Image: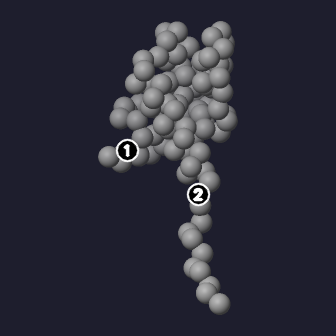
Amino acid sequence: MAAIKYKEKCVRCRKNWVITSWRSRGQLCYDCQKEELKGKIADPEMKKFFNIPEQLYKDNGFLRNIKIAYLRYGNLTEKQMEAFKKAVVKMKEDAKNPPPEPKMDWP
Ligand SMILES: [Zn+2]
């Protein structure tokens, strides 16, 4: 099942566009969530878990929401962790954006 991606204006600043595949409306943009993302993570395991390139947080509101949820509540459900990991893997793959296979030139 493909995730539905949509683009909408950030509900707080009404300035930046937000692209999200998460099924909730009202996603805030990176600029608006930046401060919330700065919280301290004490658990070394979780620190590692959230230690992904900042660009991924910029590009993906879902990842931001998960991190903020963790900072707020101090834990994540297994499902949230799975979804986070999957999203990171997918984004890294997309970033590589492999060019189409070159046509083999047989001698
Ligand atoms: Zn905003």
- Label 1 and label 2: CA atoms lie apart by 18 Å
Q: Provide the secondary structure element on which disc 2 rests.
A: loop
* Quadrant of the drawing holding the C terminus: bottom right
Q: Is mark 1 within 8 Å of ligand 1?
A: no
Q: Position of residue 7 (x, y in %)?
A: 44, 45
| Residue marked by disc 2 | 97
Q: Quadrant of residue 8?
A: top left
Q: Are the residues tagged 1 and 2 within 8 Å (C-beta)?
A: no
Q: Amino acid at mark 2?
A: Asn
Q: What crowding class fits label 1: few (fewer than 14 Cα within 10 Å), some (14-19), or many (20 or more)?
A: few
Which residue appears at 56% of the width and 69% of the height? 100
Of 2 and 16, which appears nearest the observer?
2
Check the image and report above or below for 101 versus 12: below
Which residue appears at 37% of the width and 44% of the height? 3
Q: Amino acid at mark 1?
A: Ala
Of 45 and 16, which appears nearest the observer?
45
Q: Position of residue 96 (x, y in %)?
A: 62, 54
| Residue marked by disc 1 | 3
